[in-house]
Amino acid sequence: MNLVAIVGRPNVGKSTLFNRLTGTRQAIVSDEAGTTRDRQYGKAEWTGREFSVVDTGGWVVNSDDIFEEEIRKQVMLATEEADVILFMVDVKTGVTDLDEQVAKILRSTKVPVILCANKCDDNVSQYEAAEFYSLGLGDPYCISSATGSGTGDLLDLLVSKF
Ligand code: GDP
Ligand code: MG
């Protein structure tokens, strides 16, 4: 079955989207960065097409170095096992160093990458999201995992990559 990996730094909303796509509350959503332990797999379906989703996380925060290394590992794993990668960033914080590090890895993978700007809860956000173009992965796709806004179009795009 096709596998979609959701990657990105902590707190951007990966688990919130995972839960929405899989229709479960399997992944822990938290205000505290780094609360998703281990990789969480689930099943999703869109317009009759089934696929698996993996929510990446699994880091224990000790030091910044370990933290970055753990994210790098998760992203590398995603490039090995996934058919499509959803790279999530947060429009409320804008581009961060960690976003740039993840983007650097993803620019060199053959796996299709969809850059997804989360927390676009209002109409203004899509203009702010334009800054993510600098990550070199194309135009960002604006969604709100919390309200579901934009997720239908995102899923249309996603299943077209299989
Ligand atoms: P993860 O660490 O990437 O898995 O992020 P989480 O899914 O745990 O979410 C981190 C925080 O962002 C939580 O407080 C969520 O409620 C919040 N969040 C997630 N999606 C959205 C969104 O679309 N809009 C807003 N405003 N907050 C969101
Ligand atoms: Mg999480």
Image (spheres, rainbow, N blue to C red):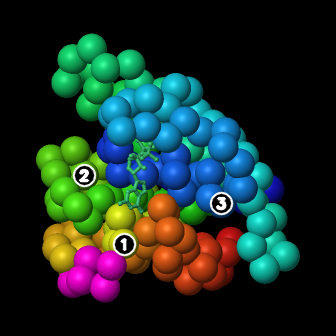
Look at the numbered disc 1 and say if its residue's Cβ is closer than 8 Å to ligand 1: yes
Seen in the picture, residue 15 relative to 148 is either above or below; the reply is above
Q: Earlier in the sequence, mark 1 or mark 2?
A: 2
Mark 3 touches mark 1? (CB < 8 Å): no
- Residue behind mark 2: 99
- Residue behind mark 1: 121
Amino acid type, callout 2: Asp
Q: What residue is shown at x 44% (from left), y 29% (from top)?
A: 35
Q: What residue is shown at x 34% (from left), y 72% (from top)?
A: 120
Is 124 inside the magenta-drawn segment? yes
Relative side of 66 to 94, left or right: right
Q: Using the rendered image of the protein, determine whether residue 21 is visible from the camera's viewpoint.
A: yes
Is 71 inside the magenta-drawn segment? no
Front tag of 2 and 3: 3
Q: What residue is shown at x 35% (from left), y 44% (from top)?
A: 11
Relative side of 140 to 127, left or right: right
- Residue behind mark 3: 21
Seen in the picture, residue 85 relative to 58 is either above or below; the reply is below
Q: What span is colored magenta in the figure?
A: 122-127
Seen in the picture, residue 4 relative to 72 is either above or below; the reply is below
Q: What residue is shown at x 27% (from left), y 31% (from top)?
A: 68
Relative side of 135 to 155, left or right: left
